[in-house]
Amino acid sequence: MVSMKKLFTIPILLLLAGCDIAVLDAKSETGQDQAFLIWFSFGLMMIVLLIVFILFARFVWKYRETNQNKDTLPKDVKGNKKLEITWTTLAVLLLAVLAVPTVSITYNQSPILSSSEESEQAVHVTVTGQQYFWTFDYENGKQTTNKLVIPANKTIVFHLKSSDVIHSFWIPRLAGKTDVLPGKELLYKIANPEIGTYEGHCAEFCGVQHAKMQFTTQVVSNEDYEKWLEVRAQKGG
Ligand SMILES: [Cu+2]
């Protein structure tokens, strides 16, 4: 059996290490919605866990063996209708509560095949994944490699493409992982990123150099973005 000391060592070490969970420190509306889902389901889970633990402790204490009852067997009870209905209903209700934000946010954020609601405000960037780097093409023809620059507080529509195998586009602080498929262009939106520099990764094992398939994302003000776009630097700009 694992000793209590060992059981607590891991979380304490994580806390001491200043454990930084990027997805919970989201810097975009899209990422914040995802972080909310994590906290929401975690919260519900903790409530259930707390109730179960309290009841468990109570029953262990209440029905423990004492000198008075050690020679008698407890009464055999089964099929309490009230209890069965209660915990079945509670579980269904809990799942229903969990389903509302989960379905709504997931549906809202899922990548689509083509953009039907072409919004004027959105900034479009074509993202091409290939072994083992990322290319970003902007609306005016500018191209960068392994460095993505986008404006803050806008909706960014990424047109995800792969020129070889399946990759996955992931900027942990901005949004979750999205598959990048060969032969199929997926549109993925990230809403209202905040100014800052964020790491990006390929999150799908795509070959021997997969771990090196990283990029930097710079979210800059709208003005800076326009200026940056005008500098006609080509690759690597
Ligand atoms: Cu990859």
Image (spheres, rainbow, N blue to C red):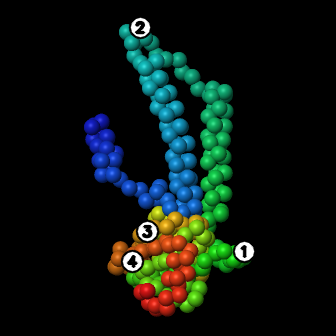
Quadrant of the image containing the C terminus:
bottom left
Q: Amino acid at mark 3?
A: Tyr
Report the Cα–Cα distance between label 2 and label 1.
74 Å
Of the numbered discs 4 and 1, the one sitting upstream in the chain is 1
Q: Position of residue 57 (x, y in %)?
A: 44, 26
Of the numbered discs 2 and 3, the one sitting upstream in the chain is 2
Front residue of 225/84: it is 225
Q: Is residue 189 left or right of residue 12?
A: right
Question: Residue under circle 1?
Answer: 117
Q: Is residue 116 left or right of residue 146?
A: right
Q: Identify the residue shown where x is 53% and y is 17%.
A: 75
Q: Are marks 2 and 3 in contact (CB under 8 Å)?
A: no
Q: Is residue 88 left or right of residue 214?
A: right
Query: In the image, is residue 96 above or below residue 35?
Result: above
Queried on whether the Cβ of the residue with tag 2 lies below 8 angstroms from ligand 1, the answer reads no
- Regarding mark 3 in the picture, which secondary structure is present there? strand
Report the Cα–Cα distance between label 4 and label 3.
15 Å
Report the Cα–Cα distance between label 4 and label 1.
32 Å
Queried on whether the Cβ of the residue with tag 4 lies below 8 angstroms from ligand 1, the answer reads yes
- Regarding mark 4 in the picture, which secondary structure is present there? loop
Question: Residue under circle 4?
Answer: 213
Report the Cα–Cα distance between label 4 and label 2.
69 Å
Q: Which mark is residue 68?
A: 2
Of the numbered discs 2 and 1, the one sitting upstream in the chain is 2
Residue 161 is at least partly visible in this image: no
Q: Amino acid at mark 1?
A: Glu
Q: Position of residue 168 (x, y in %)?
A: 48, 73
Query: In the image, is residue 45 above or below residue 26?
Result: above
Q: Position of residue 140 (x, y in %)?
A: 58, 88
